[in-house]
Image (cartoon, helix red, strand yellow):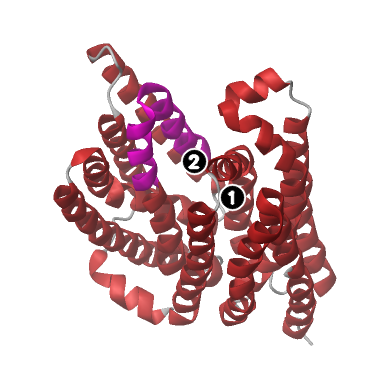
Amino acid sequence: MSSGTNAAINFIIARRVDSSEFGAFAIAYTIFAMVVGLSRAAGTAPLGISYADVPASTFRSAVRAAAGTALVLGAAVGVVLVLVGAALHGTVGLNLVAMGVVMPALLVQDAWRYASFAQGRPLLAVGNDLVWAAGLAVGVGLLAAGSATGGGAVALVLVWGAAAALAALVGVAQHHAWPDPKRALAWFTGHRETTGFMTAEFISLQGAQQTSTLIIGAVGSTSLVGALRGLQTLLAPTTNLAVALMSFAIPEFSRRKHMPPSRVIRGAYLVSGLVVVSSTLWGLAFMLLPTDFGAALLGDTWNETRDLLLLAVVAQVGPGLAVGPAAVLYAFGKTRLTFWINLFFVPFLLACPVTGLFVGGAKGVVVGNIIVFWATIPPWLYHLHCQVRTAAPR
């Protein structure tokens, strides 16, 4: 539901504005996607690791602090976006201002979702996202009724954020708690083993990936960049599924730390298997589509994207296999270990795709991803077995 709502705003705006305005929106949306990941690492991650099996009163106090941290981060980033957007003017500036205005609501709504998973009540998250989706549908309908064009990107972003604010208020009622921003610093520092390492891990991975993308975009041809963007668009649901399973799996494994090691390991393999099988089937399905259908989805970039699709399906198996082991290690509080595992591969995450670009063009970029993604699998599996057996009761 959450991914569908986010995809809907991209789709609606893409259909209603020109490419220049959509590009301006894409810049603002990319910032949101990065900030919400940072909010999860710095704010809500401890809920699923340290508070998955505590009394309700203790959890309520923790979730107020976590949601307060999300609110503070959203407000801080929002102010920066508003100031930068006001200074830039133009379409990009207006989209940044709109995203800055709605950023606090977006992060708080996401915090309530994660809290529902951490408490073992995922249907609350589904209900909250349904409120968000319904609010977005009503808002878009009202815009369409009042305007021949259905509203520009800025208006639609504000409607999307207003729907998220409504869902955030519903989250207050669901969890019987208000965000407490005064406890944000104490929450972050009090769980620095989790928040500190997960924040550093997120920043290092994102930094490597974004830098690699920028280099490829600067050096590669327009068609190459378009084809790689087409792959990201087609395979985005598989990433969303992995994130969703991770959000669900971490608190579930945390509540089951004392199970026999063999059952925990089987559970990790099951989670990874779900991601790998579903993502593989999803990617292969696009290879069976008629050319006309693919062109309708991606336009002129479809032909080159289709040539890269099989390699991309192979590449995404690596991160998919790591989802289960990573969820177990996070649940067991081994964030320091996961940080060092990821940090070791950061230089390769940056270098392999760029090297592949110079060696083999677009296919070389994807092969570079295959090399680095598959190389991460043995360390994750090794540390999964070691840590689960070490933590087992004697």
Q: Which mark is residue 318?
A: none
The residue most toward the right is 262
Image spot of residue 228 (x, y percent): 60, 45
Tell me which label, 1 or 2, sits earlier in the chain: 2
Vertically, is 123 above or below 295? below
Left or right of 290 in this view: 335: left
| Quadrant of the rendered image containing residue 288 | top right
Q: Are marks 1 and 2 in contact (CB under 8 Å)?
A: yes
Is residue 21 inside the magenta stretch?
yes
Vertically, is 362 above or below 290? below
Q: Does dot 2 land on a helix, a strand or a loop?
A: helix
Vertically, is 133 above or below 348? above
Measuring 28% from the left and 18% from the top, which residue is drawn there?
A: 142
Q: Which residues make up the magenta segment?
A: 1-29
Measuring 84% from the left and 70% from the top, which residue is drawn there?
A: 262
Measuring 44% from the left and 34% from the top, which residue is drawn there?
A: 10
Left or right of 385 in this view: 89: left
Measuring 52% from the left and 40% from the top, which residue is drawn there?
A: 3
Q: Which residue is mark 2?
A: 2
Q: Is residue 119 visible?
A: no
Image spot of residue 237 (x, y percent): 61, 41
Left or right of 365 in this view: 284: right
Q: Which residue is mark 1?
A: 244
Which class describes the residues within 10 Å of circle 2: few (<14), some (14-19), or many (20+)?
Answer: some
Image spot of residue 352 (x, y percent): 66, 66
| Quadrant of the rendered image containing residue 349 | bottom right
- The kind of residue tagged 1 is Ala
Is residue 20 inside the magenta stretch?
yes
